[in-house]
Structures are given as structure tokens and as C-alpha cells.
Image: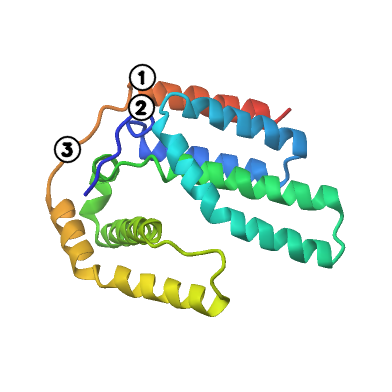
Amino acid sequence: MKENTGILAEQSTWLKLIILLISFTLGLDASFRQLLWLLGVFLLIFISDLSVFSKLLIALRRILPFLAGYWVFATLFTLQFPAMLLFSLQVLYFLVITVYCVGTIDMKHFLQDTGYLQKYRFSRSLIYLILATSLFIRKYFMLLGERQISGGDSIKNVLASFASLIGENFAHAMEVEDTIKSSLEHDRGHRVFFTFPNFLAFCFLAAVVIVGSL
């Protein structure tokens, strides 16, 4: 299981969950100016771990076809330009939030942070589901990156290619299951909460709340 490194990967999973919920809530009814400021705050925290920018670029490549399709249909239905621009900025903002909260999670630290929940059957099953989903998504995007899909391909060929990728991904189901079981059975102990990465996360959370309330 590949591990994330960097100061953002060292931050508490629970702090990231709080940041995710608050940031998402603020973005739902934020103005254009607020979204720009919030994006600036997120990009600023990314400077502490430059490897996150490469993940952000990959995510942007995945979302651009959706945004292009949205602009085509929005133009056809004569939606107002400010509304189209605001929606597009919201999509980019939610994408940045996802990259920060999900793309920087390290599996080993996630298991350490949720160690006491693994004692209970329901929460252990939930953790298993989260890990399985995360590993399947990572494997899918890894396969997608290896598969070159030409922009000139027909819709039928593109759909067939995506179906093939999904089939290849599910072919690794047993490997994913073995990885998760061995990870859950291994006692990793608990992490110290009062660390510099978590202090940075608290400061970041405060900045998000302040900027979101402007």
C-alpha cells in the first residue's frame, strides 16, 4: 500500500474531516469573491506540500471534460454568464477541497486515527468500506493514466474503454481485500495529536472560517 508523505499527510484525519465539512458548507452559498479567497487559502496551504499540486493537476484534467460539457449545455439553454461562472468556480473549489482532504490522506495514519473505532463491528465494517472505495478509486485513476484515450475517439469507443478499465479494476478485488485485511489486523498504535502539522491544520481551519465569513 503506497504511503503519502509530507506535512499535509501527517495531519489528523479527524481535523481533515472537520475542514471538509466546514469548507463544503461555506462553498454552497459563497459569493464569487469568497470562492476566490477560499481557493487562495487552499492553494496557500498546498505550498507546504508541493506534491499536492501534481495531484491537483491530475484532478483538473479529469474534471475539464465535465466543465466543457456544462458550458455547452448551459449556453444552449441560455443560462446567464455570471451563474455559469459561479457554478464552474464552485466545482473547482469542491475539487480543491477533495484533493486536500482525500488526496493527502495516508492509509497508515488513517488506520492509526481510527484505531479505537476498529474495536466495534459496525465502525470496522465502515472503515473497511472506506478503504476499499479509496483503493479502487486510486487504482482506477492509475489505470486511466496508463490508458491513452484520444480526443478523436467516438463516444462508443470512449465508453467501451471506460468499461474495460472498470473490468480491469475489479480484477484486482482479491488483492485489495487481502491488503485491507492485513492492514486492519496489524496493530499500528495511536498518533500524538499535538504536533506541528495539526497546529498548521488548526490555523488553516481558522483562516477558512474567517475568509468564508467575509
Residue at far front of view: 152
**What colour-coding does the image apply?**
rainbow
Q: Secondary structure at mark 3?
A: loop
Label pair 1/2, CB-CB below 8 angstroms = yes
Question: In the depicted view, which residue is nearer to us: 91 or 142?
Answer: 142
Q: Residues within 10 Å of mark 2 (few under 14, many from 20)?
A: some
| Residue 17 visible, this angle | no
Please state which amino acid type lies under the numbered disc 3. Gly
Q: Is residue 147 above or below residue 12?
A: below
Q: Quadrant of residue 9?
A: top left
**Upstream in sequence: badge 3 or badge 1:** 3
In the picture, the disc for residue 120 is none
The residue that disc 3 covers is 189
Few, some or many C-alpha atoms within 10 Å of disc 3 (few <14, some 14-19, many ≥20)?
A: few
Is tag 1's residue or tag 2's residue first in the polypeptide sequence? Answer: 2
In this image, 39 relative to 195: left or right? right
Q: Alpha-carbon neighbours of circle 1 within 10 Å: few (<14), some, or many (≥20)?
A: few
The numbered disc on residue 196 is 1
The kind of residue on which mark 1 rests is: Phe
Task: State the residue at coordinates (45%, 27%).
Answer: 201
The residue beneath circle 2 is 7
Quadrant occupied by the C terminus: top right
Residue at 17% from the left image edge and 38% from the top image edge: 189
91 and 55: which is toward the camera: 55
Residue drawn at x 28%, y 45% is 114
SS for dot 2: loop
At which x and y percent is residue 15? Answer: 43, 35
The quadrant in which residue 131 appears is bottom left
Total numbered circles: 3
How far apart in space, not on screen, are marks 1 and 2 (Cα)? 9 Å
In the rendered view, tell whether residue 80 sits above or below residue 24.
Answer: below
